[in-house]
Image: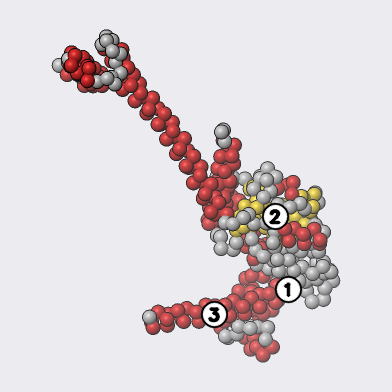
């Protein structure tokens, strides 16, 4: 298998990551594990330094695996996406509540 | 017994006989009284002419029998033509109503790119077959691989119905997605997906043609770790290389196939109608 290592020269990227189907599935799996762990400790924004300590205490292994199995740019993307998805679901919930209240008033 | 049967089988003949007889009788009634004759100066009969009953009845036979057949025949053909034209009009109207106002200016222009084997790939490669074009990049975290898997399911389902569609994957990230990278990347997905890349400006140009949001910075190094924002649509193109339909993320394994099949069927029907015009 020929693979041109894109990130070998870059200091901030993950050298272990190879962009193929197997590696992608491994990355998504460890992402889900990590996020499940964050759910348990009620952390939504894992990029916030305030949560760092809590994450290190409870989800250290999951975080390590996630960082190992995914490209660095993907890790940031998934963490941001978790935040956006959460906000969107919150907005949806608020809208739904509002709609229900309006129905009751009617 | 035999009489009853024959009257059953040939009722029209008997009707005609009766009509003939009654007419002959009525004419005899007319002509037999000379007083009446003089009171009808506008009679079509020549004055002093003979009653030509044979001719009269022959005319009557033509006007009742053959005329009815002729009338039914002409009416039938007319009805068929009318229905045919009406169906065509309905089809045309349906197509136009779906198209909305004007044709969207998506794709259809010229471009010069290269495929994953390093061969030239231009608008000429879209001619003569239906194509599904997807824009993405190999280093896409989650959406592109999902969509490419979905594309594979669509292609298999379409093939079952004997519909061949050429799948094309155009990268929005030409700095990293060189032909050999695309080849390697696409080997994970459905056979036959053509990876397409090119110079930065050429990729920027084709993204503009297809209204794809393109945010790739120009001076990135291939070894940098970055993501590329791009809009997510499958573009269905007709055998003339013209845009037919954009399929977004709302389509799943089934609805996408139905949409594509509908579009292709409509295209073929319109094509047939154009060829069938004989007047």
Real-space CA distance between mark 3 and mark 1, rounded to the nearest whole angstrom:
27 Å
Q: In the structure shown, which secondary structural element does the residue marked by tag 3 occupy?
A: helix
Which is more N-terminal, label 1 or label 3? Answer: 1
Percent x, y for residue A4?
A: 81, 62
Graded by Cα atoms within 10 Å as few (under 14), some (14 to 19) or many (20 or more), the crowding at tag 1 reads: some
Horizontally, residue A46 falls left or right of residue A95, namely right
Percent x, y for residue B259?
A: 55, 54
Q: Name the residue under label 2.
A: B107
- Depth check: give the residue in front, B276 or B110: B276
Residue at the (75%, 55%) spot, across then down? B196
**Quadrant the N terminus of chain B occupies:** top left
Q: Mark 1 points at which residue?
A: A73
Horizontally, residue A84 falls left or right of residue B69, namely right
Splitting the image into 4 quarters, where does residue B233 fall? bottom right
Residue B16 bears which disc, if any? none
Q: In the structure shown, which secondary structural element does the residue marked by tag 2 occupy?
A: loop
Residue at the (57%, 77%) spot, across then down? A88
Residues at discs 1 and 2 both on one chain: no
Q: Mark 3 points at which residue?
A: A91
Splitting the image into 4 quarters, where does residue B228 fall? bottom right
- Tell me if I can see residue A39 in this picture: yes
Residue at the (62%, 78%) spot, across then down? A84
Graded by Cα atoms within 10 Å as few (under 14), some (14 to 19) or many (20 or more), the crowding at tag 3 reads: few
**Quadrant the C terminus of chain B occupies:** top right
Q: Which chain carries label 1?
A: A
For residue B78, above or below residue B239: above
- Depth check: give the residue in front, B195 or A42: B195
Residue at the (81%, 64%) spot, across then down? B175
Farthest residue toward the left? B1
Percent x, y for residue B108?
A: 70, 52
């Amino acid at each position: 298998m020929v693979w041109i290592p894109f990130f070998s020269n870059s200091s901030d990227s993950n050298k272990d990551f190879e962009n193929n189907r197997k590696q992608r599935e491994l990355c998504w799996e460890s992402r889900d594990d990590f996020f499940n762990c964050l759910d348990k400790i009620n952390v939504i924004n894992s990029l916030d330094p305030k949560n760092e300590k809590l994450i290190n205490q409870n989800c250290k292994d999951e975080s390590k695996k996630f960082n190992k199995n995914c490209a660095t740019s993907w890790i940031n993307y998934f963490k941001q996406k978790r935040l956006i998805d959460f906000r969107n679901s919150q907005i949806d919930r608020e809208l739904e509540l509002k709609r229900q209240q309006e129905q009751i008033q009617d | 017994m035999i009489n009853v049967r024959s009257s059953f089988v040939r009722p029209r003949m008997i009707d005609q006989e009766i009509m003939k007889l009654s007419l002959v009788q009525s004419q005899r009634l007319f002509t037999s009284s000379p007083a009446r004759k003089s009171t009808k100066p506008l009679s079509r009969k020549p004055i002093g002419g003979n009653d030509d009953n044979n001719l009269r009845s022959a005319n009557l036979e033509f006007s009742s029998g053959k005329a009815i057949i002729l009338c039914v025949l002409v009416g039938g053909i007319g009805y068929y033509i009318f229905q045919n034209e009406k169906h065509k009009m309905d089809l045309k109207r349906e197509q136009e109503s779906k198209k909305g106002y004007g044709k969207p200016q998506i794709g259809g222009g010229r471009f010069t790119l290269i495929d994953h084997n390093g061969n030239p790939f231009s608008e000429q490669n879209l001619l003569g077959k239906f194509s599904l074009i997807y824009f993405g990049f190999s280093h896409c975290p989650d959406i592109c691989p999902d969509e490419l898997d979905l594309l594979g399911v669509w292609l298999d389902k379409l093939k079952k119905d004997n519909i061949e569609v050429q799948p094309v994957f155009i990268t929005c990230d030409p700095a990293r997605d060189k032909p050999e990278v695309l080849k390697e990347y696409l080997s994970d997905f459905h056979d036959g997906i053509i990876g397409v890349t090119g110079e930065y400006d050429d990729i920027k140009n084709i993204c503009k043609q297809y209204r794809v949001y393109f945010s790739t910075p120009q001076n990135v190094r291939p070894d940098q770790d970055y993501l590329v924002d791009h809009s997510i649509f499958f573009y269905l193109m007709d055998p003339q290389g013209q845009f037919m339909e954009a399929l977004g993320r709302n389509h799943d394994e089934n609805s996408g196939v139905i949409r594509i099949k509908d579009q292709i069927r409509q295209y073929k029907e319109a094509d047939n109608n154009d060829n069938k015009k004989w007047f």
